[in-house]
Amino acid sequence: MVKKKYLFTPGPTPIPPEVSLAEAQPIIHHRTPEFSAIIAQVKEDLKYLFQTTQGEVYTFSSSGTGGMEACVANLLTRKDRALVVRGGKFGERWGELCEAYGVKTIYVDAEWGKAVEPSAIDKALKKDKSIKAVFITHCETSTGVINDIESIVQVVHSYPVLLVVDAITTVGIQPFLMDQWKIDVAVTGSQKGCMLPPGLAFVAVRPEAWKAIEKADLPRYYWDLREMRKSLEKDTTPFTPAVSLVRALKVALDMMKEEGLEAIWRRHARLAHATREAIKALGLELFAQSPCNILTAVKVPKGLDGVGLVKRLRDKYGVSIAGGQGEELKGKIFRVAHVGYMNDFDIITAISAIEKGLHEAGYPIEVGKGVATAHALLIDSASKGAVTAISEKKSRVEVTLNPKT
Ligand SMILES: *Cc1c(COP(=O)(O)O)cnc(C)c1O
């Protein structure tokens, strides 16, 4: 077979050719009216993406974790305590970051594969009044679970505590309403829903968080949001930004505006629903109890080598899906992403590759059943299953969105 590559991983994700071409343009200098005009546009479009008019979105040249580090470095003082919600690898990352800065960190643990109970957060906040901020993951990419941020924000804000959300695999994928939900600070990265290469992190800050940012006394230099704010007011950045990526970002955001956020959320809901149903039709089980729409995490069934399946698809067929992360999940799950620049046909391809891998591994499946299930659901977007998947999220999808500018 021709070695054509297919990317079904939860970051990096496929990139539209228009975006790649924008990135390949001759470089320009960043202290120019030409580049400032791009920043001026992009800063408005990023607000649309996060659904904030009251907040501002700051772009760092880093992977998503850099944006997470910016949150920790800018919001806390040496005396503050942080509450970290952990239900997977990315929740653990919030904890590692807080501890790296010497912040006293308290944990609320959710069983991997399950969403966190808002009441567990309430209990922890009631017990310790010195907690200044809660750090949580909206969609835990390592397990495929989505947390109920709308309920959690209400719990957190019944205390004088900030809520910081890793929304790296929610923004531009499924409903995320920064202003309406009153999320103080949120982060996303370029290589998930934004259809860009890795290399940019976006930190959205609502006005309420600025008091903490001014007061914070942890060491900060590159990640200093005060410097970012001063610069962004003048449509520039404190340091040399990833100029080519920012140009590509403009094109990607144009594409996202053209499709519209609600349509993007619906598309991901449909693709996720079809994938989940196809997996179940093959007799496999989902890992996440409240699955997100960026990826489907599948339990590796008895008698199947999960690591081998991922490796076989990659090495033999050029198809990248993701395995389980860390000691906890390695070989126990595999994850297939349906995020960003993807449509119905990509799902058919992904499911057919998984069928091929399972079949070749000698695992008993009815070949074609997964593909047929996905195809039937996708071919008629009004089909019952797909409609159910969307109406579950109906209240969230049918909000009045801030207009694009
Ligand atoms: C991808 C991802 C990150 C960021 O990881 P980087 O490798 O630093 O870009 C953080 N949180 C979640 C939930 C993610 O999916």
Image: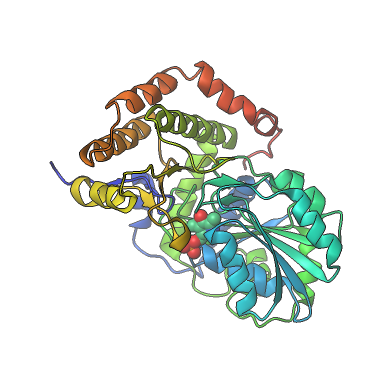
Where residue 262 sits in the image (x, y, percent)? 59, 33
Quarter of the image where the N terminus is located = top left
Mark yes or no: residue 38 visible: no
Q: Quadrant of the C terminus?
A: top right
160 versus 343 height, above or below = below
Q: Which residue is drawn at the image coordinates 43% and 40% (left, top)?
A: 338
In the shown orientation, is residue 45 left or right of residue 319?
A: right
Q: Position of residue 397 (x, y in %)?
A: 65, 32
Task: Spot the residue most to the front.
Answer: 303
| Number of disc labels | 0
Type of colouring: rainbow
Q: Is residue 252 visible?
A: yes
| Residue at figure coordinates x 77%, y 61% from the top left | 162
> Which of these two is toward me, 70 or 59?
70
Which residue is more in the foreground, 382 or 87?
Answer: 87
**Which residue: 55% across, 60% down?**
90
Pick the front one: 15 or 276: 276
Q: Is residue 47 left or right of residue 5?
A: right
Q: Is residue 105 left or right of residue 388?
A: right
* Residue 387 relative to residue 242: left or right: right
As drawn, 225 above or below 296 = below
Percent from the top left, x then y, of residue 186? 65, 57
Residue at the farthest left position: 1
Compared with 401, 140 (above or below) is below
Task: Pinpoint residue 135: horizontal percent, then vertical percent.
Answer: 68, 62
Would you identify the image quadrant in which residue 166 lies? bottom right
